[in-house]
Structures are given as structure tokens and as C-alpha cells.
Amino acid sequence: MSKIKVENLSKHYGEVTALEDVSFEIPSGEFVVILGESGAGKSTLLRCLNGLATPSSGTVSIGGSKVTNHRTDVGMIFQQHNIIGQMSAYQNALTGALPRTTLLRSLLQWNDRQDKIAALEALDTVGLLEEANQKVKQMSGGQQQRVGIARALVQEPNLLLADEPVASLDPASAESVMGYIKDAAAEHDLTTLASLHQVNLAREFGERFLGMKNGYLVFDGTRDDLTVDVIDEIYGDIQTDSIRETTSESQGTDDLKSDSVPNGNAEVAE
Ligand code: ADP
Ligand code: MG
């Protein structure tokens, strides 16, 4: 687990501003959800955190050391599962150990006993131990993403990043996969940042929220601070009309309580 510090982070692609003067700190072990519509800068922020993108200005540090290039101690779960369909769940999970495996050993498929155990433990964490030998292409989207989580865990990360990890899943699978990510993070005491565009899921799983809009950080707060007005600011009024109607009917208040969020209605299309 690691503390994250982002200071005055900006990232420009030519004329395009992907991030502008973003600053925040995340204490070790916190589970943070990044909200924002498509193009808001969520992926760029995550890429700056794992060193895949270089800031135009500002700094990112993890556990006190500045991020300067790609970090293998940062586990990443992607929207497109980035797993290999021809390989088994176990073999895919084991690829998480590649950064610490020599080329020769990986070509010969010689893995340390410890890595093999780590792969099986990670599959157990995501409820797929029984399916370890199943080819991933035969699995459901939700199971495939759980293999992606297992692979990230085998990396033995200090920080877990997830970029829209459930965007391609149906609502039930999305909820289940988010549950596995949260449990895995808790089990490994991992600081976690996940971007999501489904507000209802975000509220169910997030402890703290960062709201992005046009590259700016427009919100940083807890679930109680994440009112309908704040969501309006992040996404625009249209997306929250249905929530507002439901909450004012049932509670006569603008406050967004988790049990009053209609499933799916709060979803913001990418
Ligand atoms: P999000 O993940 O919230 O959808 P992104 O971080 O992908 O947002 O993008 C933020 C902005 O930066 C968008 O306007 C996007 O078009 C632009 N952008 C992102 N990556 C690149 C890139 N590699 N080259 C040019 N523009 C980019
Ligand atoms: Mg993105």
C-alpha cells in the first residue's frame, strides 16, 4: 500500500488539455473512485499515475518517490480485459509475474513456485480457483475481468488502478466484479483508484470520489458530499434528472441516498 501525492498535474496533447492543474493526496489503503464523462481526463490521470504518460507539468509521487517512468509495482485493470483468450485463467494470472521473470525463464515457461502459488491464490480471491484450467475465451465477460484482477494481484502491486473496469459488462456482472476488486483491495491492503461512469456503482463501492471535468478536478469528497448537485456539475443536468425525481418523491430532499438510486438510471453513457 502506498500514499499518492499529485501536485499541480497538467497534461496537454498539442492544443488539447487532458489534465489541468490537478492536485490531491490519497492516504494508504483508501478506495477512490474517479468520476467524469468521456474525455474528462480519467484515463490520462491513471496513465500519469503508472508512468505510462509523462506530465506536461506538475508531479506525481507514490509512496514518497516521484513517478518518472512505467512502474511495475502499479497493478492496472483495463476496460478491455487485456487477457489472452487462448490461455487458461491460471496462465493469464501468471503473466502478472512477468515483470520479475527473466526472458529465458518466461520463454521456457519456468515459473517460480512462489509465483505459481500467487497465481492460484489470486484466482481464489476472485472466486475462480475451480476454473483455473479453463480457457479464458470460454469464460463470461465478468469472469474474464476477474482473471484481469487476478493478474494485477500477481504483480504484487503497491497500488491498484482500474480504468473503467466494468464498462463493458452488464449491470449484474459489473456489480459483482466491483465487489471482487473491493475485496481484493481490502485483502491486500491496496490503495485503489478506479474510474467509473456509472454513478450508482460508484456510490455503492467508493469511499472517496474525485470528479473530473474537462481536465479539471471539480470535486474531491466523500459519499455524503456527493450530492445530486455535485453529480450535475460533473455530468450535466440531464443525467441526474431521474435521480432527482426519485429522491424528491421518496425523501423530499436533493440529497442522494444510496438506497434511492435507481439501478441503471444513473448510468452515464460513454
Ligand atoms: P476519459 O478517460 O475521461 O474519457 P481521457 O483521459 O482519455 O478521458 O482524455 C482526456 C482528453 O485528452 C480528451 O480530450 C482526449 O481526446 C485527449 N487525449 C487523451 N489521450 C490522448 C492522446 N494520446 N493524444 C491526443 N489526445 C489525447
Ligand atoms: Mg478513459
Image (spheres, rainbow, N blue to C red):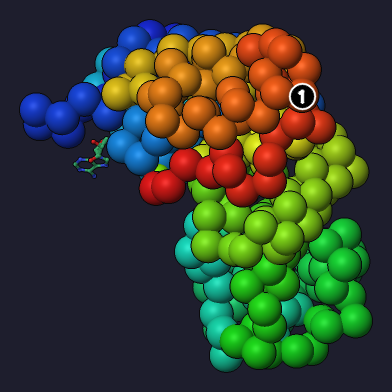
Q: Position of residue 179 (x, y in %)?
A: 80, 49
Q: Decide which of 24, 110 is in the foreground and name it.
A: 24
Single out the residue that lies furthest toward the front. 249
Residue drawn at x 51%, y 29% is 240
Instruction: Give the quarter the ligand 2 occupies.
Output: top left
Q: Position of residue 237 (x, y in %)?
A: 42, 23
Residue drawn at x 89%, y 75% is 129
Query: Quick check: 130 above or below 232?
Result: below
Position of residue 162 in the picture relative to residue 133 (left or right): left
Q: Which residue is mark 1?
A: 250
Position of residue 115 in the picture relative to residue 147 (left or right): right
Query: Quick check: 169 above or below 268?
Result: below
Residue drawn at x 77%, y 24% is 250
Mark 1 vs ligand 1: CB under 8 Å?
no
Q: Position of residue 172 (x, y in %)?
A: 73, 60
Single out the residue that lies furthest toward the left. 15
Query: Label 1 sits on what residue type?
Result: Ser
Residue drawn at x 73%, y 53% is 175
Which element is circle 1 on?
helix
Mark 1: give few (<14), some (14-19) or many (20+) Cα within 10 Å: few
Position of residue 219 in the picture relative to residue 193 (left or right): left
Residue 260 seen from this side: yes
